[in-house]
Amino acid sequence: MIWDVHAHLNDPRLAGELEAVLARARAAGVERIVNIGFDGDSSAASVALAEKYDFIYAAVGVHPHDAAGAGPQTWDRLRDLARHPKVLAWGEIGLDYYRDLSPRDIQRRVFTEQIEMADEAGLPIVIHDRDAHGDVLAVVCERPPAHGGVFHSYSGSWEMAREVLRLGFYLSFSGPITYRNARQALEVLAKAPADRLLLETDCPYLPPEPHRGKRNEPAYAALTAAKMAELRNVSLEEISRITTENVYRVFTRLQPGETDAGMDSGIKPE
Ligand SMILES: [Zn+2]
């Protein structure tokens, strides 16, 4: 069983044929998906999707692109959504200095504020870091999240990874580890401890080879898993097992032994 810990299934490119997308995911062994919000509306949509499908979970938060547009109403809404039992994390949050769609000082303030909200909600965070490695590290050092978190689609150096791991974070890898120019990510993947690795697609973005340049979907997490297995010289089964164990360690709202029936029933089978 593979967990895709970072998907955007509400994106129109996937939502239009969601049943087929989900069927292909399950056929490829990608049996659990964490669907990620990026603002108030997408976070609410993410929780709604998690209510509809027992194998889909949600994260709620405001992406750095949308930081400037978030206000008190957004935060009230997210705090409310975060109480839902299928919300596993607060995210995605962080800094994006590549597109700079919100002013950088606002991105930093909103990132820090959301770490505080995640702490209050009892949730780990999901970090988006694009071309902002130094400042992301500065924020999480100054205001470490109480419940840890995940660096999603990790793209930094091994030196940064060492710091991130020392701070207790998990590293999640996506399609780019299959690209020919993935030298830096491969170094991190080779050196990082097994008990901090996670798999994701970030679909519809970042498709692995041979789908580079096209639309990504959760089924392709199996291709990234196969590449991770090859790089670490272990079987695909072993990568699936390790990354699933890590999912339960970082997303502590999940109950071990949870069944497809979801988390609502408190009745445990004999
Ligand atoms: Zn994302």
Image: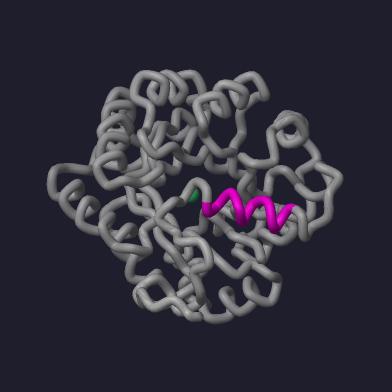
- Quarter of the image for the N terminus: give it: bottom right
> Seen in the image, is 246 located left or right of residue 235?
left
Q: Residue at x 42, y 18 (%)?
A: 138
Q: Residue furthest front?
A: 270
Which corner quadrant of the image does residue 47 belong to?
Answer: bottom left
> Seen in the image, is 48 located left or right of residue 16?
left
Which corner quadrant of the image does residue 265 belong to?
Answer: bottom left
Q: Main secondary structure of the magenta part?
A: helix
Q: Residue at x 51, y 74 (%)?
A: 259
Start and end of the magenta stretch? 239-248
Where residue 106 appears, as percent x and y from the top left, is: 27, 28
Where residue 120 appears, as percent x and y from the top left, is: 24, 42
Q: Residue at x 61, y 53 (%)?
A: 245
Q: Residue at x 31, y 28 (%)?
A: 103
The image shows residue 75, relative to residue 235, as above or below, that is above
The image shows residue 8, relative to residue 48, as above or below, that is above
Where residue 166 appears, as percent x and y from the top left, is: 55, 24
Query: Is residue 243 covered in magenta?
Result: yes
Q: Is 259 in front, or is 183?
A: 259
Query: Is residue 153 covered in magenta?
Result: no
